[in-house]
Amino acid sequence: MDAAVRDIAARYRECLASERRSREGSPAPDSRALLQQLAEALAQRALVDARVAVLEGTYRASEPHDEPRRSAEDALSSLESDPAREAEFVYLFQRFSTECRALFSSDCSGNSEDSMKIGESLERVEAAVAEVQRRLAAERDAAPCEDECDASPGGGGVLDRVEALRRRVEALQALVPCQHCKQLQDALDRLHEERARGENALAQQAGALAAARRARAQLQAQHERERVALRERARTLQRRLAALDSEYSAQLDSLRAAYQSAVAADTHGDGLRARYQQEIEQLRALCEKGLLAMESSHRRIVREMEEKHRAEREQLRLDKEQALAEETRATLAALDAMRKAHESEVRREVDKFKAEFLARGAHADLSHLSSRHQQEMEEIKREILSLSEKYSVKCVESAALEERLASATAQLAQAHNHIMQLDSRNKQLRAHLISEANEMKNSEGSPLSQLYEDSGAVRI
């Protein structure tokens, strides 16, 4: 606003100086040219005043019938005092009206209301100038024009107007906001932005911590489900092993009974014994294959369970360490933020206390400041205690999770030991079967059909 007013005033002064210089070197114009210059000068003055009023915000539209009358009276008085003003008026009107329209259209392009007001003011000034020209033409037809008067009063009026315009520009400069106030406002805005960023960072940390907690809960639930599934699988394997043991005992008893009955009924010689010996060797090979397959299956299952259990323990340990690290970082960040906030608050309170002490003197009341500072310190202590309690609760929860993990590990170890016991029992049964086969090899043979049936049952 200040720059626009200065620009208008500078252009006005430059145009007046150039017109005066051109007027001094040119012959005296006629009365119509002088009238035109006077009307242009009045229009320029009205446009400058309207521009300043719009920039100040004190513009008020006047009555349309009063302004042409005042403009006409001013024009008549100026012509009567100095005929040379007529030429100046016409020239300035033709030149500055175009420049002011272009300037106002470029300055007020973003404000349609100001543009409309300035356009209406310009139209009223043009109407006033036309009215002055018509009245002067009528008076010139009725009576001859008077002689030229001294140009000093008109020049003094222009100088007074320029001085008034300068004072109004200085008044507008006083309305420019203080630079210190702007700096304080910028500092306040920066503090608000830093506070908003801190709150956003805390919210993000809280969201990350909540996500880590949810992920840990999901992992715990998944581990619980897998542990239940492993228990069910171990029970199934135990039942299957018990069924195999009972089936093996039944088959062994049936084979022994068949062999004894065959020995009792056998009356043949060495040829039959050799044939039975071959069948016994085949049966032994089939039994050994079945036992080897069962043993490899048990070992593979045990190895898979051990690897899975080891991977789960490692994953749980990593998750627990990560969660504890995240909680520790979040707690340290919160404590650091609280410490920084407390330090800044203490510094502000100290500065404020110094300022109040210097302002009030030695008789300042320090009890209120000390009590408020004490209250703030108590609040900060309570916040620190609450954070410590929360951290202790998290540590207790982590310890409980570790205990649960240890119990699950112990249960898996028990299951592993039970599987190893079953494996050892399987080896014992295998050795017993081999010894029974050797005994059958040394004794009498049994019927061939019964042996084939028994070998098929063992294979199944």
Image: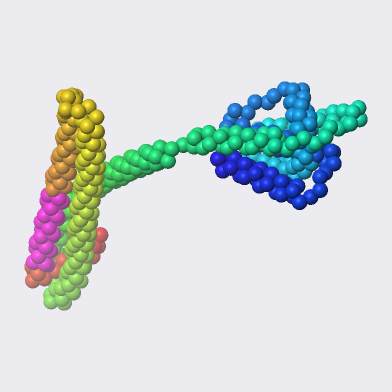
Which image quadrant for residue 245? bottom left
Residue placed at 22% from the left, 39% from the top? Answer: 347
Q: Position of residue 35 (x, y in %)?
A: 81, 37
Name the residue nearer the viewer: 144 or 385.
144
Vertical order, 194 against 450 (above or below): above
Q: Is residue 181 visible?
A: yes
Farthest-out residue, right:
141
Which residue is more in the foreground, 244 or 26? 26
Front-most of 91 and 331?
91
In the picture, the quarter occupied by the C terminus is bottom left
Q: Is residue 275 above or below residue 49?
A: below
Q: Relative to 63, is 265 on the left or the right?
A: left
Secondary structure predominantly adopted by residues drawn in magenta: helix
Q: Relative to 204, is 434 on the left or the right?
A: left
Total marks placed? 0
Q: Quadrant of residue 144?
A: top right
Residue at position x 23%, y 51% in the image: 322
Which residue sits at x=74%, y=25%? 70
Magenta stretch holds residue 430: yes
Residue at x 19%, y 70% (from the top left corner): 285
Q: How far across and down, in percent of the image, does residue 130 sit?
A: 82, 32
Position in image of residue 416 (x %, y %): 14, 55
Q: Position of residue 454 (x, y in %)?
A: 21, 61
Q: Residue 360: which quarter of the image? A: top left
Is residue 415 magenta-colored?
yes
Is residue 137 placed above or below 16 in the rendered structure?
above
Q: Which residues are magenta?
A: 408-437
